[in-house]
Amino acid sequence: MKKKIPLTGFTSLAIHAGHKTESNYAHQVPIYASSTYVYETAEQGMRRFSGKEEGYIYSRWGNPTMTEAEEKIAAMETFDLRDNNGSPMLVKGILHSSGMAAISTMMLSTLKAGDKILTHYSLYGGTDELVHKVLPSLGITAIILDLRDLQKAEDAINADRSIKMIYMETPANPTIQCVDMEELARLAKKFNLLVACDNTFATPYLQQPFKYGVDYIMHSTTKFLNGHGTAIGGILLGRDVELMNTHVTKVHRLLGGNANPFDSFLLIQGMKTLELRMNRHCTNAMEVATFLEQHTAVSKVNYTGLSSHPDHCTARKQMKDFGGMLSFELKKGLQGGINFMNQLQMCVRTVSLGTCDTLLSHPASMTHHGVPKEMKDKYGITDGLIRMNVGIENINDILADLEQALS
């Protein structure tokens, strides 16, 4: 048999990575709708539980459909990357029931009482509530800074050695601010801190945090990876494969935030078109951002593709393109936002993001409803802010809908 040639294209990887021929030679990975797995002998079951033999035991612990999704995402996040020895980078991915489940597993498996997280303004509302309302009861607290100011970040670490992790979300939800992953990872390593990054907005096609020294990556696979709004899911990926296979896996299994085979199947199908979709998302988003920046009803546009965005250079440094997410502020504030949202015809009024259709939401009253108003104001999540997932529809139809809704 000839030596297997390596895949050199991202979409080839998105389609074929992780796929294994199964016993019935199905073209697509089957949906393994089984809660448990049988053994040929009692001794085999003993070997499985002791770890002496690989194999599936119980679908909360692993499932063949879920495994293909995990390996596919791991392959995309490490596409064309090398480790310190020059070998292809290896990471471990664990699929979860949601992005929040993945973030929870990461934090609870790496932090303990007395530890602190250094993070930035404008996190996803669920993450913000987790670090402010759940983790403090476990003795884990957060320090919130503008991590774009590296000197402030270093001063904070020097002042408080209980900081054990830098947590970032770049681009951030919903203000689309970006932080410099490479510089923050370099700072973290100087003080022996862990670095975690939510890569949901960018996807592995546009941005690979492992390239810049990040230790853990999380995604809400519900969003761009699935791409069609058909399933909830999340994934945690880590560079320390041994730790991921042992302690982190144990925490994940005991917390019970496992994925399921049907949602995993939908995720696998969606990821095959990730590159094609993201190229269209990016092209459309740039046109929408340019249109909005020139509109008289709009006071501010947050999109890193615009040279006016304060983090434009950071985004250019670490992203292949600028993504499909933006936000903008209306001059008439809350009532202007209500009027605009109610006038939309083709574009969809809903939360979530990453789908093929254009979605708009009002973060202050929706995704970040649970964040105190003084914090929202500080983070730039104003009453007039609209978040927009720019879809892959024909751009003229998106612009026409926005124009009539803003008039």
Image (tube, rainbow, N blue to C red):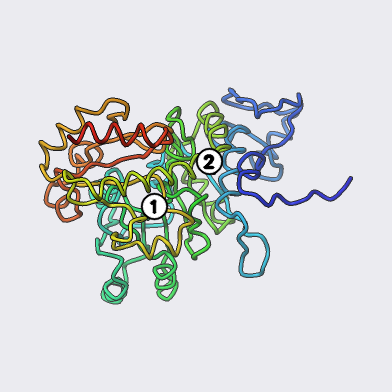
**Residue sitting at x 52%, y 54%:** 238
Kind of residue at disc 1: Met
Q: Mark 1 points at which residue?
A: 107
Task: Give the crowd class for mark 1: few <14, some 14-19, many >=20 residues within 10 Å.
Answer: some
The residue pinned by badge 2 equals 274
Image coordinates of residue 98 in percent, x first then y, are 42, 37
Residue 315 visible, this orientation: yes
**Res. 185 image quadrant:** bottom left
Residue 135: in sight, yes or no?
A: no
Crowd class of label 2 (few under 14; some 14 to 19; many from 20; radius 10 Å)? many
The structure residue drawn at horizontal position 72% and vertical position 30%, both measured from the top left corner, is: 42
CA–CA distance in space, label 1 to label 2: 28 Å
Residue occupying the point 56% across, 25% down: 35
- The mark total stands at 2
**Judging from the image, what secondary structure is the residue with disc 2 in?**
helix
Residue 105: where, in percent of width, then height?
Answer: 42, 47
On residue 382, the disc is none
Instruction: Specify the quadrant that holds the N terminus.
Output: top right
Q: Which of 4 and 258 is in front in this view?
A: 4
* Mark found first going from the N terminus, 1 or 2: 1
The spot of residue 235 in percent (x, y) is 48, 43
Q: Position of residue 175 (x, y in %)?
A: 27, 51
Asked where in the image residue 169 lies, by quadrant, the reply is bottom left
In this view, the mark in front (1 or 2):
2
The quarter of the rendered structure image containing the C terminus is top left
Secondary element under disc 1, as helix, strand or loop, is: helix
Along the line of sight, the residue nearer the viewer: 374 or 353: 353
Q: Which amino acid does label 2 sit on?
A: Leu
In the displayed structure image, the side of residue 159 where residue 320 appears, left or right: right
Nearest the eye: 128 or 256 = 128
Residue at 31% across / 37% down in the picture? 399
